[in-house]
């Protein structure tokens, strides 16, 4: 009965079909803005690969294929099922996630976890936006001025996100055009050098730490899938305003896969073209397009580009705060949002000041480990229910929580658990050598696979809590399905 449901589930109202909009006015637009964020594409050429060449250490091919594969995995394995459930129900992630984690467990995941991780994104946004602004005044990364700007950026973005987001939203639609134009200008200036690019211009006589082309391909995929993980689960909220399954698919193919391939490949081309044109001869290897701008465009234009990229990054920082506030409102309804979000912002500031927010690739992997299993389990849940939302489940759904725990261990093995075991071994705690030597390839994708497979297996074995009745879900299911068939 609906009376058995917590208030945040029982009172949820689906977005009516009359308020739905086409994919190009919602899903594609939103996701394209995320993938045009400079913090994403400036890290694609390195992707966290060891050595000076990043994923370009063996040339362009491995990197390009990695970007394309990562983009398609983001669409089909992270976004598609959450997006379809959002469209078919019109309900938010905090409610839709109760089918996978239970109505009690859903308080914590994905709702509360989504809120916490948004402050991680706020920290990353603040750190790198402040880095660009500090660079305008001639201060290096890590300088007190850089960190002070980062703190102010986080505070202002959080305040605007809580109180004035509707003002930012009015211009946020157009701001993603700024990085789009900058990428195209940089590509236009460096494209002539692509034919002269040789990976030895980055790596010298030897390739990067013995990594093969396949390993570099997997590193590129891991970077992209890890970055996108929370945005994939947020597809429930983003696609809840879509009219049909066709909108969900087209919005994802254009805004997720298409925009990722576009920005990621352009970033690779810009770096390769810069070196192929001989613009970096005798200089230290730089893989970030933002740091190559002075060489490509000259100091004055580069500074203008930095300022514009920082401005374009402000609305995403505000939206992170807004999403966090919405998550906390669902999970902590009696706590003032200024208190709950204030604690979160304090955490963001700590990440900025400590410098941890500057380790973007590591942040991407942790986020992928956290939300990869969620996307995998939600996809399994959706398919098992006959490609529809199953409805809320009682308590803590064992299949969901076990699949998440195992998926998180797999996804965070290299960054958290392997160093932890190494530290234990140094303290003479007996750890099998095989565990110390083991390295997980492409952890965010492995986390998705484990989340999917384990949930599927446990559900087949009957380890799902019972489904609770929710009339609003049944009512909202019919119209979108009919619209999807008509479309």
Image: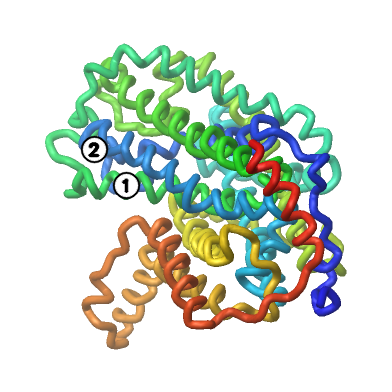
Q: Position of residue 396 (x, y in %)?
A: 64, 79
User: Upstream in the sequence, badge 1 or badge 2?
Assistant: 1
Relative depth, front residue between 251 and 134: 251
Residue identifier under label 1: 49
Residue drawn at the location 29% of the way across and 44% of the way down: 217
Residue at the (27%, 76%) spot, across then down: 435
Tell me the quarter of the picture where residue 28 sits: top right
**Point 53% across, 60% down: residue:** 379
Q: Is disc 1 in contact with disc 2, using a CB cutoff of under 8 Å?
A: yes
Give the residue displayed 45% in from the left and 29% down from the top. 262
Res. 70 in view: yes
Please name the residue that numbered disc 2 is placed on. 57
Q: In this view, does 432 lie to the left or right of 97?
A: left
Residue 243 coordinates in the image, percent (x, y): 71, 40
Look at the picture and state if 259 lies above or below 468.
Answer: above
| 269 left or right, relative to 233 | left
**Which quarter of the figure is the N terminus placed in?**
bottom right
- Residue 36 is labelled as none
Residue 132 coordinates in the image, percent (x, y): 56, 32
């Amino acid at each position: 009965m609906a009376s058995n449901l917590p208030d945040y589930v029982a009172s949820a109202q689906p977005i009516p079909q009359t308020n739905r909009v086409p994919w190009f006015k919602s899903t594609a637009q939103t996701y394209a803005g995320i993938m045009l964020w400079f913090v994403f594409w400036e890290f694609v050429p390195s992707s966290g690969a060891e050595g000076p060449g990043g994923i370009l250490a063996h040339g362009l091919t491995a990197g390009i294929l990695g970007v394309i594969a990562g983009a398609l995995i983001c669409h089909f394995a992270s976004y598609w099922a959450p997006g379809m459930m959002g469209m078919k129900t019109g309900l938010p992630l905090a409610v839709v996630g109760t089918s996978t984690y239970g109505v009690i467990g859903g308080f914590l995941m994905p709702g509360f976890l989504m809120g916490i991780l948004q402050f991680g994104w706020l920290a990353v946004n603040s750190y790198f936006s402040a880095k660009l602004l500090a660079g305008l005044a001639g201060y290096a990364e890590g300088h007190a001025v850089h960190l002070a700007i980062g703190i102010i950026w986080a505070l202002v973005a959080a305040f605007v996100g809580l109180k004035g987001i509707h003002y930012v939203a009015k211009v946020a639609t157009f701001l993603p055009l700024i990085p789009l134009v900058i990428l195209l200008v940089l590509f236009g200036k460096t494209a002539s050098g692509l034919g002269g690019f040789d990976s030895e211009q980055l790596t010298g006589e030897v390739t990067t730490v013995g990594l093969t082309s396949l390993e570099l391909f997997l590193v590129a995929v891991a970077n992209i899938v890890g970055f996108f993980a929370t945005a994939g689960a947020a597809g429930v909220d983003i696609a809840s305003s879509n009219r049909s399954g066709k909108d969900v698919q087209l919005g994802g193919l254009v805004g997720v896969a298409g925009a990722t391939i576009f920005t990621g490949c352009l970033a690779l081309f810009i770096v390769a073209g810069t070196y192929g044109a001989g613009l970096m001869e005798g200089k230290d290897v730089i893989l970030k397009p933002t740091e190559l701008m002075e060489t490509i465009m000259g100091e004055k234009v580069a500074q203008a580009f930095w300022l514009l990229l920082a401005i374009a990054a402000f609305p995403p920082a505000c939206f992170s705060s807004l999403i966090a506030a919405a998550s906390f409102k669902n999970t902590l309804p009696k706590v003032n949002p200024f208190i709950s979000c204030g604690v979160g912002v304090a955490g963001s500031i700590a990440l900025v000041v400590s410098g941890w927010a500057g380790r973007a690739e590591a942040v991407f992997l942790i986020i992928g480990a956290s939300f990869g299993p969620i996307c995998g389990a939600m996809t399994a849940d959706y398919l098992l229910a006959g490609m529809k939302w199953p409805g809320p489940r009682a308590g803590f759904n064992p299949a969901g929580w076990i699949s998440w725990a195992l998926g998180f261990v797999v996804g965070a093995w290299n960054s958290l658990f392997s160093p932890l075991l190494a530290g234990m071994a140094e303290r003479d705690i007996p750890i099998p050598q095989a565990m110390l030597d083991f390295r997980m390839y492409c952890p965010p994708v492995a986390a998705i696979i484990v989340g999917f497979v384990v949930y599927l297996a446990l559900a087949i074995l009957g380890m799902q809590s019972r489904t609770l009745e929710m009339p609003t879900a049944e009512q909202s299911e019919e119209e979108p399905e009919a619209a999807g068939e008509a479309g």
